[in-house]
Image (cartoon, grey):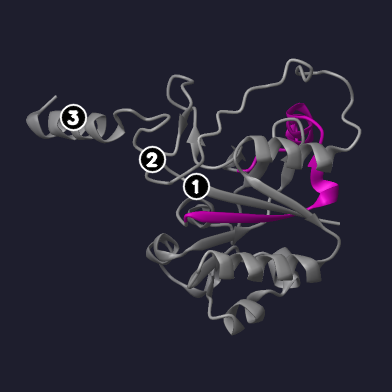
Amino acid sequence: MNEAGARFIEGIKARTKGVGPGGYRPTKAPDSAWTRAPDRAFGGPEIEDPPARFLEELEALGGHGSRVASLAEARDYLVELAKRRGARRLVRWDVPELDELGVDARLANAGVEVCVWRDLEDFRPVAASADIGLSTAEWAIADTGSIVLASGVGKGRTVTLLPPTHIAVVPARKVLARADEVFELYAGSGLPSNLCFHSGPSRSGDIEMSLAIGVHGPGDVHVLLVG
């Protein structure tokens, strides 16, 4: 390794030293290291109310969840949250579900600039300066409080990764009980080029299976179940 490479590695070590409770936490994510309750083993008893269980597990992860009956209530939730966060800019996926939600005008009236993925040639600097990212999700998993995000047209990954707050609007009928149901859905039908499982705010376990919280990704995650 050359000198520049060594300096880079040392810089990373210095910045990430003490990741964990009280350590380096640029995303300000809550320190919620979810652990499975003994009476909720994998493959345990049937989950009678998947949406309710999903919201419970998401809260245990440090996220925020709510279930509303209609798109009108979803719009109210989003506008109120944007006001509470003092948001000035929101970026969102360019998907029919969010067009149908119809919250853009309400947010604009509240002083929040809405940027849609299709409107810009280079979305990254806009997403990086946004206060909120708004998306849907393919599925939600009750057992782990996770949402499943798939790649596709209009679904820029930076929308769900760069803004400090991420909101996902998901139909309640898309809450599955367990992760293996997701795998079965995609088995033999072809996977998208990118399929991500997001479990709570700002956490990653992709390096040696060690959980790191608060290093990257949104520190404030909300999932809104509709229906």
**Pointer 1 local density, CA inside 10 Å: few below 14, some 14–19, many at least 20:** many
The residue depicted at 72 percent of the width and 70 percent of the height is 75
| Pick the front one: 197 or 44 | 44
Q: Which residue is mark 2?
A: 25
- Tell me whether the residue at label 1 lies in contact with that at label 3, contact meaning CB atoms closer than 8 angstroms: no
Q: Image check: 56 left or right of 49?
A: left
**Sequence-earlier tag: 1 or 2:** 2
x and y, in percent, of residue 164 in the image: 47, 54
Q: If the image is split into quadrants, where does the N terminus sit?
A: top left
The residue identified by callout 1 is 219
**Whole-Å distance between the Cαs marked 1 and 2?**
9 Å
Q: Is residue 168 above or below residue 119?
A: above
Foreground residue, 154 or 42? 42
Left/right placement of residue 227 relative to residue 64 reads right
| Mark 3 Cα shell of 10 Å, populated few (<14), some (14-19), many (≥20) | few
The amino acid beneath tag 1 is Gly
- Give the foreground label among 1 and 3: 1
- Which disc number belongs to residue 10? 3
Q: Earlier in the sequence, mark 3 or mark 2?
A: 3
In which quadrant of the rendered view does residue 129 lie? Answer: bottom left
* Residue at image coords 42%, 46%: 27
Q: Identify the residue at horizontal 75%, vertical 34% (top origin).
A: 182
Badge 1 vs badge 2, beta-carbon distance below 8 Å: yes
Q: Is residue 89 magenta?
A: no
